[in-house]
């Protein structure tokens, strides 16, 4: 096919800003998404829920950046450099925000804002290309998608920063604004070590698309290839140099999560393992459902492959499903790729399906809401306060400002803003001034220490006495 025919086959967009009430659709969708997720985060905070230690870790990182101390996170080990755990230099941006609002809740709201901004941006691209109603449907499908709900429910993670960047990069690529796409994509490499590979694939997609659609201009192709090299270089540098150099044992801590050598030795088995067992297949089906199937018509879906491949080839089954935050970065890719697919198909023989796709996508998102976090907003039981809330608040208040404290999961991120927090039981940590134990907490697997002072004395080699013991929450203070 000649180049001119290829250019005629390319999807057309309407980059002009929407007029009239259509201008209100993108901010309206963004505001709705913000309200829903902030509401849910506040509800979760009200219930004192702590799904993991990650929020405590990232809160301590933000606190350290705010104080000008660098990425020091004692929860991971006394004096530990968190850039030796994962490569996320973009999180330095948390420092100024935390300095203004020193609370773990701040990070939850920051994540909610990043989700909402990405929903606004995606809706804006969709309204510009398709009109108000289809654009609103795509924006809502994104904002309510299972990947974003799961990410918000497990509290803050660094991938939240990738969401608006990916939407803006991919949306710009759909509109053939090559330079803008590359500039928005480039910082994604600083969100996490694996996302440099995602940037690299995005660069290759940009180069391929520009080769077909840039009217013979070689500069966008070179830009895409440069972006691909940039992303690949940062992932390689992070995994082989930065992370091992800053890790306490001199190696990339998650190297065992993906065995590329085994996959290369048995490529057929590796391909089969991408969709087996069924938990993996369900994740693929969920993504196809959100993209109404037609998403496969867009080459932008290739940008999702790096994340999906490392997750599905990993022996860690926690990466395979639709829970946690691992699908969050896939949501911008799938929904912008759906927009691109609709533009490609709307004037062909599949035009009816293409025109219905935005509405179908939001229907899929709504059908997946039951059993997901946002369903809690309509459940009266979710508004019941934690029966131990007063006791938890009393323990937090009893730890003096600036004191060192070792704690288990229950009060971890509540203690970080006021104290120097360590994870309870970490080897080689100095003896803290205080020890906090929740005998009902998940940390102990149903077998908590009966004598908290004795346990602390044995572990830290210092003398401790219990100063509070209420509703199974125990606070011990170091003597002398």
Image: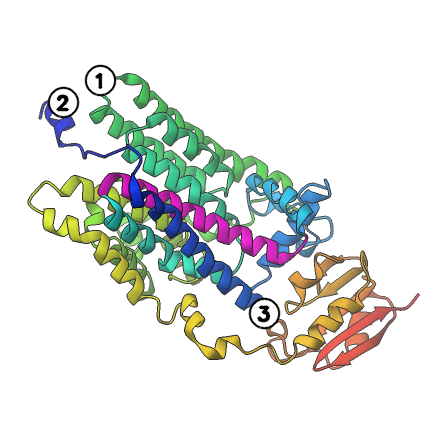
- Percent position of residue 162, x then y: 45, 44
Q: Residue at x 30, y 51 (%)?
A: 136
Q: Which of marks 2 and 1 is nearer the N terminus?
A: 2
Choose between 329 and 309: the one closer to the eye: 329
Q: Name the residue that disc number 2 marks.
A: 3
Q: Main secondary structure of the magenta part?
A: helix
Residue 108 magenta-drawn? yes
Vertically, is 354 above or below 35? above
Q: Name the residue that disc number 3 marks.
A: 46
Q: Name the residue that disc number 1 marks.
A: 216
SS class, disc 3: helix
Q: Which residue is drawn at 55% across and 42% down?
A: 87
Q: In which quarter of the image is the C terminus?
A: bottom right
Range of magenta residues = 102-130
Quarter where residue 465 is shown: bottom right
Disc 1 from disc 3: Cα separation: 58 Å
SS class, disc 1: loop
Vertically, is 446 above or below 30? below
Q: Are marks 2 and 1 in contact (CB under 8 Å)?
A: yes
For label 2, count other residues whose C-alpha is less than 10 Å away and answer few (under 14), some (14-19) or many (20+): some
Vertically, is 197 above or below 434? above
Q: Which of marks 1 and 3 is nearer the N terminus?
A: 3
Q: Do the residues labelled 2 and 3 touch (CB within 8 Å)?
A: no
């Amino acid at each position: 096919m000649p180049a001119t025919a290829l250019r005629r086959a390319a999807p057309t967009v309407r980059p002009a800003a929407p007029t009239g009430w259509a201008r209100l659709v993108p901010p309206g969708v963004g505001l709705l998404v913000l309200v829903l997720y902030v509401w849910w985060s506040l509800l979760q905070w009200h219930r004192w829920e702590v799904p993991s230690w990650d929020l405590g870790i990232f809160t301590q990182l933000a606190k350290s950046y705010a104080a000008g101390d660098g990425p020091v996170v004692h929860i991971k080990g006394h004096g530990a450099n968190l850039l030796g755990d994962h490569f996320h230099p973009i999180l330095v941006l948390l420092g100024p925000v935390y300095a203004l609002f020193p609370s773990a809740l701040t990070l939850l709201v920051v994540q909610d804002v990043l989700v909402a901004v990405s929903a606004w941006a995606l809706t804006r691209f969709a309204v510009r290309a398709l009109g108000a109603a289809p654009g609103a449907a795509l924006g809502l499908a994104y904002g309510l998608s299972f990947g974003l709900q799961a990410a918000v429910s497990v509290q803050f993670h660094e991938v939240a920063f990738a969401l608006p960047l990916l939407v803006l990069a991919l949306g710009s690529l759909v509109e053939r604004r090559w330079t803008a796409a590359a500039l928005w994509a480039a910082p994604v490499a600083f969100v996490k070590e694996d996302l440099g590979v995602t940037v690299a694939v995005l660069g290759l997609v940009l180069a391929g698309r520009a080769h077909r659609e840039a009217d013979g201009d070689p500069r966008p192709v070179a830009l895409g290839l440069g972006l691909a090299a940039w992303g690949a270089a940062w992932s390689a540098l992070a995994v082989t140099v930065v992370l091992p150099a800053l890790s306490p044992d001199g190696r990339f801590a998650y190297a065992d999560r993906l065995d590329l050598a085994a996959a290369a030795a048995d490529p057929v088995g590796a391909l089969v393992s991408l969709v087996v067992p069924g938990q993996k297949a369900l994740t693929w089906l969920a993504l196809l459902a959100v993209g109404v199937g037609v998403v496969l018509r867009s080459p932008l879906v290739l940008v999702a492959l790096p994340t999906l491949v490392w997750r599905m080839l990993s022996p860690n089954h926690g990466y395979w499903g639709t829970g946690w935050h691992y699908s969050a970065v896939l949501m911008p890719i799938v929904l912008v790729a759906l927009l691109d697919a609709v533009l490609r198909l709307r004037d062909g023989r599949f035009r009816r399906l293409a025109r219905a796709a935005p509405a179908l996508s939001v229907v899929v998102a709504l059908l997946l809401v039951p059993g997901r976090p946002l369903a809690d907003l309509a459940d009266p039981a979710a508004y019941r306060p934690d029966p131990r809330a007063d006791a938890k608040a009393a323990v937090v208040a009893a730890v003096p400002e600036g004191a060192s404290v070792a704690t288990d999961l229950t009060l971890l991120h509540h203690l970080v803003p006021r104290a120097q927090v360590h994870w309870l039981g970490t080897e080689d940590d100095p003896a803290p001034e205080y020890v906090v134990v929740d005998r009902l907490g998940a940390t102990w697997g149903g077998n908590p220490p009966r004598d908290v002072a004795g346990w602390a004395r044995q572990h830290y080699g210092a003398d401790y006495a219990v100063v509070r013991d209420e509703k199974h929450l125990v606070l011990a203070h170091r003597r002398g």
